[in-house]
Image (cartoon, rainbow, N blue to C red):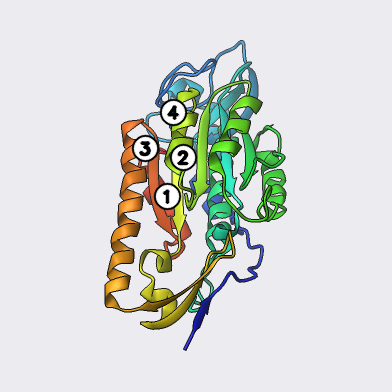
Amino acid sequence: MVRAINERNVEDRLPLFDSVFLAKLEQLHLLSRKIFRGQQHAERRSRQTGSSLEFADYRNYTPGDDLRTVDWNVYGRLNRLFVKLFEAEQDLHVSLLVDCSASMRWTPEARPAGELSKFDHARRIAAALAYIALANLDRVNLFPFAGELAPDLGFVRGKQQFHTVLEFLKRLPGSPGDGGGTQMRAAFRTFAHRMKRRGLVFVLSDLFDPEAADALGFLRQQQFEVSALQVLDRAEIDPALATGGRGDMRLVDSESGTAFDVLADGGLLDAYRREFSGFVAAVEAHCRQRAIGFIQTTTDVPFEDLVLRVLRDSHLVK
């Protein structure tokens, strides 16, 4: 018996962010360990403040904010604390690099109902990170990549641009460049040359590229502050979840189309798990050595838990 594990056609599903969840996101800030041009502090609590800057927006007060930035007139009317945000001449640039390769759209045949593909999960994370940055008046851009870097959104600013971000994420191309493969090094070199200013870079990918670690290291060498969010399907960690057990299988590489007929016995499954965990450990160690943030998540992790707890615990947001 041959079991086929192939890429499915998945729906383009993006998050329906309700007002309650958006309010929670507004309490967060993207953390920067470096001081880029235009920043006053290594860990930003709010945009710059002062009489010489132009008022732009409000956000909810969080403990630790400078009380001088609270709008006490609003507090007198609404009995709620809001912090005033101001336009600055320079601000932080946040770039979200989203992997659109064929492997990101792969899902197992025995997929739980309602569970998102890696690609959908990555787009949801990108949307949440974008909103956090926009709510704090940072400039945000989205860069799709696979075999090459695809045309980007262009930097946007302010919460009113969130709908522009969502529309761009809905229209992300399928595997730009070479029909499905991933070439992170080439894509990231194009990105670095395209960027005139440095800032925060978030890479959302399964990192299924032999040069993934070196490509991330290249961005770090180019003076970007880099965080990699590896998005996996649970079945990639434990292939027994994808196959339903053991037996004859045909494995198809979703990017190259190469097929392998194998007998999935206990020994082969154990060897796969060892190789996979070794691959992830090597990428993570490479990132740690080069001060690159690294988080691994799977498509079965509840989305709000990932954004509100995992990213905060990993010091990517505060």
- Amino acid type at circle 3 is Cys
The mark that comes first in sequence, 3 or 4, is 4
Residue furthest out toward the bottom? 1
Q: Is residue 211 above or below residue 302?
A: above
The mark that comes first in sequence, 1 or 3, is 3
| Pair 3/4: label in front | 3
Q: Is residue 311 left or right of residue 2?
A: left
Q: Which residue is mark 4?
A: 32
Q: CA distance from mark 1 to mark 3?
A: 23 Å
Residue 32, image x, y percentages: 44, 28
Residue furthest out toward the top? 52
Looking at the image, which residue is at 72% across and 53% down? 171
Residue 294, image x, y percentages: 38, 42
Q: Which residue is mark 1?
A: 308
Q: Which residue is mark 2?
A: 28
- Amino acid type at circle 4 is Ser
Marks 1/3 in contact by CB < 8 Å: the verdict is no
Q: CA distance from mark 4 to mark 2?
A: 13 Å
Q: Which residue is mark 3?
A: 287
Which sits in the foreground, 195 or 215?
215
Mark number displayed over residue 273: none
Looking at the image, which residue is at 58% across and 22% down? 91
Q: Quadrant of the C terminus?
A: top left
Residue 266, image x, y percentages: 28, 77
Q: CA distance from mark 1 to mark 4?
A: 18 Å
Considering the numbered disc 3 on the image, is that residue within a helix, a strand or a loop? Answer: helix
Q: Residues within 10 Å of mark 1 (few under 14, many from 20)?
A: some
Considering the numbered disc 2 on the image, is that residue within a helix, a strand or a loop? Answer: loop
Which sits in the foreground, 80 or 91?
91
Residue 87, image x, y percentages: 63, 21
Q: CA distance from mark 3 to mark 2?
A: 24 Å
